[in-house]
């Protein structure tokens, strides 16, 4: 009997072909998963190596720098200076490796926010002023009047590239003045942008850029920079990172025929008439950062907004200063020597008295969910990504300085949950909230019945978790209760009642938030 006319006979070869395609597809997907995990593992390894190396590097600087104040002869002074220059170069390499790891893991996220070009250029010039003076030079800037007062883009990464390239230009520069000029540029596909030029750059950067050009380093179709040439100079890694970042920003870097270094970035004009900012109080802020350039940049950004700034380079010193009191906030880099940022925050939270409650803002090179959660778990109040974006930093400080927050915001910070969704994803945040709600009933029961030691344990758990799910008031009261219970103070019972009420209201808000 012949098969029906509308049903062709089975083709064994086609079935085998389809099975082979399915097998290869599954193998390809498995290989992709392994490759992505390998990239993540490499990123973690590089981050760990960077932190481990930074500790002895900081120790070398602390041991060697005081020698410059000793009565040394010219030869000995030059040797000490050479050690410090070499350590500085090593620090730059560590920063470049960290940036490269983030690029390879696709962790670098660019903001699209209005910013003042003058602010970015001014902070970069300020950051390099000391390095220039040590070489008997100075850095100046000129912004063409045609450049809009504000443009839209990522101010932090633009400043990062500008500082890196200017630093390379300074390293062996010979001219007394290094001038960076900014002008409007027309980029590919009709996009507007900015063009930065640096004349009189040192011969090392010029030679490196010529080496790239000779190797045919023109970048991919998507603007991604190529792999550095095999025989690369000392600036190759930093230059490679800058090219990769500029590619993501729609720009490029190159060398003109007359030896002028240039780079471009995509930047659309910003708001023509910016709104007047609200008056906010001046804060006393402790900046904990071991990189000298980042120290100056962060201090410049804060002082420009009227804040008082103290800078330290290691975690142990930060804890000692916080213990003396007088700070309204701490801006804490995670990768500092001595105690790292997480350990220093734990030590701060263990202090006695109100100093233990000082807000701590993490500066982190990673926005991976597990790293954000680690910051929250040790009692950090918020975080800003590295390099520090002026707008993001201003928003974080605004949450600390708003003199009269609305009652709802004082207890429940929905913006914190929304921001967390942007990092973790909606499903993961919902699971996080569900876990918290599952624990809340037990914690409330323990609050009602607990003696002082158990009150401290309950408060410690809420301190670690409540802020993560947006329960700002619960977090603040839990911090106060934990210390009061540890110290056996009478107000612990009153704080426990307050915390129970806040937790009850917070649970209702969370249930409404997740639906």
Image: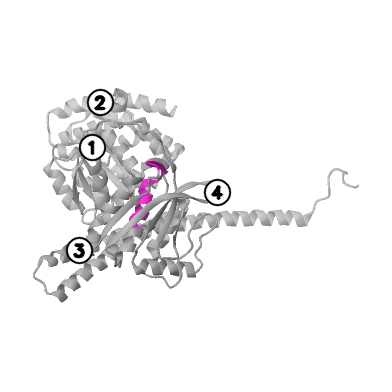
Q: Badges 1 and 4: C-beta atoms under 8 Å apart?
A: no
* SS at badge 2: loop
Foreground of the two, 75 or 57: 75
Left or right of 229 on screen, residue 120? left
Q: Earlier in the sequence, mark 2 or mark 4?
A: 4
* SS at badge 1: helix
Q: Which residue is mark 4?
A: 189
Q: CA distance from mark 1 to mark 4?
A: 59 Å
Q: CA distance from mark 4 to mark 3?
A: 48 Å
Range drawn in magenta: 148-164
* SS at badge 3: helix
Give how far across and how far down residue 493 sits, in percent: 17, 27
Q: CA distance from mark 3 to mark 1?
A: 41 Å
Q: CA distance from mark 2 to mark 3?
A: 45 Å
Q: Which quadrant would residue 338 be assigned to in this image?
A: bottom left
Can residue 508 be seen here? The reply is yes
Foreground of the two, 497 or 1: 497
Q: State yes or no: residue 83 in magenta.
A: no
Q: Which residue is mark 1?
A: 457
Camera-side mark, 4 or 3: 4
Q: Which residue is mark 2?
A: 404
Q: Which residue is mark 3?
A: 61
Q: State yes or no: residue 155 in magenta.
A: yes
Foreground of the two, 385 or 158: 158
Q: Earlier in the sequence, mark 3 or mark 1?
A: 3
Camera-side mark, 2 or 4: 4
Camera-side mark, 3 or 1: 3
Q: Badges 2 and 4: C-beta atoms under 8 Å apart?
A: no
Q: Earlier in the sequence, mark 4 or mark 3?
A: 3
Q: Residue at x 36, y 45 (%)?
A: 117
């Amino acid at each position: 009997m012949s098969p029906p006319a509308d049903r062709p006979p089975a083709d064994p070869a086609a079935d085998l072909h389809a099975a082979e395609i399915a097998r290869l597809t599954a193998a390809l997907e498995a290989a992709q998963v392994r490759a992505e995990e390998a990239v993540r593992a490499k990123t973690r390894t590089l981050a760990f190596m960077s932190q481990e190396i930074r500790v002895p590097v900081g120790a070398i600087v602390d041991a060697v720098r005081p020698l410059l104040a000793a009565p040394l002869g010219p030869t000995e002074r030059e040797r000490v200076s050479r050690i410090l220059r070499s350590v500085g170069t090593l620090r730059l390499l560590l920063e470049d490796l960290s940036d490269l790891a983030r690029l390879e893991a696709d962790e670098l996220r660019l903001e699209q926010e209005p910013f003042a070009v003058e602010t970015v250029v001014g902070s970069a010039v300020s950051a390099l002023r000391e390095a220039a003076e040590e070489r008997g030079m100075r850095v100046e800037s000129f912004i063409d009047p045609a450049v809009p007062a504000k443009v839209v883009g990522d101010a932090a990464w633009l400043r990062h590239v500008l500082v890196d390239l200017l630093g390379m230009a300074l390293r062996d520069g010979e001219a007394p003045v290094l001038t960076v000029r900014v002008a409007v540029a027309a980029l590919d596909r009709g996009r507007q942008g900015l063009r930065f030029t640096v004349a009189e750059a040192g011969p090392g950067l010029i030679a490196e850029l010529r080496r790239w050009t000779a190797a045919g380093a023109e970048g991919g179709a998507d603007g991604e920079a190529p792999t550095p040439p095999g025989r690369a100079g000392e600036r190759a890694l930093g230059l490679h990172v800058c090219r990769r970042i500029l590619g993501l920003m729609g720009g490029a870097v190159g060398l003109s025929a007359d030896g002028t270094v240039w780079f471009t970035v995509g930047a659309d004009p910003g708001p023509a008439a910016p709104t007047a900012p609200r008056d906010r109080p001046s804060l006393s802020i402790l900046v904990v950062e071991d990189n000298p350039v980042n120290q100056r940049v962060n201090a410049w950004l804060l002082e420009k907004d009227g804040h008082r700034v103290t800078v330290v380079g290691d975690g142990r010193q930060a804890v000692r200063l916080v213990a003396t009191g007088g700070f309204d906030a701490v801006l804490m880099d995670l990768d500092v020597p001595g105690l790292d940022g997480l350990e220093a925050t734990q030590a701060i939270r263990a202090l006695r008295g109100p100093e233990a409650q000082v807000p701590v803002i993490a500066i982190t090179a990673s926005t991976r969910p597990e790293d954000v959660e680690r910051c929250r778990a040790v009692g950090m109040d918020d975080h800003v990504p590295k390099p520090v974006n002026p707008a993001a930093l201003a928003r974080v400080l605004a949450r600390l300085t708003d003199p009269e927050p609305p009652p709802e915001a004082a207890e429940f910070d929905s913006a914190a949950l929304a921001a967390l969704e942007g990092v973790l994803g909606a499903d993961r945040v919902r699971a996080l909230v569900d876990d918290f709600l599952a624990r809340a009933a037990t914690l409330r029961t323990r609050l009602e019945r607990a003696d002082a030691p158990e009150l401290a344990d309950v408060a410690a758990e809420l301190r670690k978790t409540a802020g993560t799910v947006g329960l700002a008031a619960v977090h603040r009261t839990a911090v106060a209760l934990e210390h009061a219970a540890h110290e056996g103070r009478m107000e612990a019972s009153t704080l426990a009642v307050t915390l129970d009420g806040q937790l009850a209201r917070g649970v209702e808000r969370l249930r409404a938030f997740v639906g």
